[in-house]
Amino acid sequence: MFDFLAEAQKYFTYTRDMRRDFHLHPELGHQEIRTAGIVARELQALGLEVSTGVGKTGVVAMIEGSQPGPTLLLRADMDALPILEQTGAEYASQNPGVMHACGHDGHTAILLTVAKMLHGIRAELPGSIKLVFQPAEEGQGGAEGMLADGVLDNPKVDITLGLHLWNEMPVGSFALAAGPTMAGTEIFKVRVSGKGGHGAIPHLAVDPILAGAQIVSALQSIVSRNVAPLQSAVVTVTTFHAGEAFNVIPPHVDLTGTIRTFDLDVREMVLRRFDEIVNGVAAGMGCTAQIEHVRMTPALINDAKTTKIAQGVAARIFPDSPVTTSGPITMGGEDFAFMMEKVPGLFMFVGSANAEKGLNYGHHHPKFDIDEESLPRAAALFAATAVELLNR
Ligand code: NI
């Protein structure tokens, strides 16, 4: 049988050098011009037909197998974060204030490596592989942009597959978890309006600060009293802005924050209770409230059958590696969930931390860095799972 790990190890220098090059030159969401250019160049060098500018700065290419079969979408994200890098690495960002602090540099290098590996054995593959290099994952609508540009059509995608290097797990471990794996994420914005007035004459005003404070407290009852104890949700108020002067009751208070859920029924209930509490408490305090909800990402839910196949692949390639098989993995969000919501599939987590080498800072930390030994492991798992899925 084809030895995917040995093959991925052969490409180690290529993968690492690509990753370091992207790390040196990070680009924010929808500005991945240089990165997308390198991706397109590398794919064209394989003889692939490449579409650029998909969802603004995304890149798509197809690898055709030799027989008919399913179409599998493999996705990597390319964008960096607005963070000033403090790793001191020799390949640290040369673009001050922009940093690959989530591992997307690695994801792009891994998928380029997978493209080489799968292109090399395309004569033995059924179906086709759609390589998707996505921009702007960090909350700027990258996946939605590619969906709007028809990334799931022509040819129609049957299965979706993606991965994340994960610094909350040591290198050598994996998480291939069926079911809800990453949280659905929402932003809320609330304006509570009362009636401004003199701080010393409160009875002639309607104080929105008092109402806002009661609302923040009352919102805590959703998770503690409405969500079933064995289910999970987060309701967090992260900003509270009001007033300018010590002796003035302001006319309104602005609150923002985030809601995280896994289950669609829980999500609906939390949103309903949120509105009831905000409107009800505001009214009880003589105020009115305006509420705006923005859905950032749906919950990421891994398809059970696809996950099982990948677990089998991992057990074969990495017989000694620990594999987490049930989620959730994180309350963080991931916009690949928008694609997986339309076409079921799997999002895999590849352990990338190494505490002994100091490579265990969390994602989005200015000292975030990965153990590069995770790169060939990720490429091997990605390519082998793809082949297994095509052959099923
Ligand atoms: Ni990420």
Image (cartoon, rainbow, N blue to C red):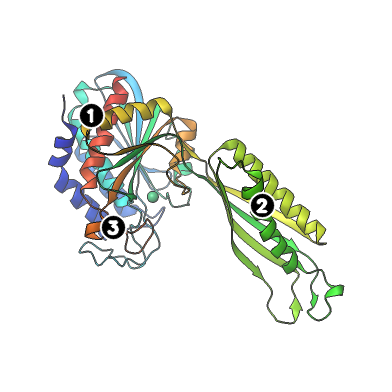
Residue type at numbered disc 1: Arg
Identify the image quadrant of the N terminus. Answer: top left
- Is the CB–ligand 1 distance for label 2 below 8 Å? no
Residue drawn at x 38%, y 55% is 31
When asked about the image quadrant of residue 2, the answer is top left
Residue extending farthest top:
68
For marks 3 and 2, give the CA distance: 38 Å
Residue extending farthest front:
229
**Residue topped by disc 1:** 316
For marks 3 and 1, give the CA distance: 28 Å
When asked about the image quadrant of residue 164, the answer is top left
- Which residue occupies the foreground of this view, 309 or 97? 309
In the image, is residue 345 above or below residue 87? above
Labelled disc at residue 221 = 2
| Secondary structure under the numbered disc 3 in the rendered image | loop
- Which residue occupies the foreground of this view, 293 or 173? 173
Q: Position of residue 100 (x, y in %)?
A: 33, 57
**Residue topped by disc 3:** 369
Looking at the image, is mark 3 or mark 1 earlier in the sequence? 1
Identify the image quadrant of the C terminus. Answer: top left
Residue drawn at x 28%, y 35% is 382
Residue type at numbered disc 3: Asp
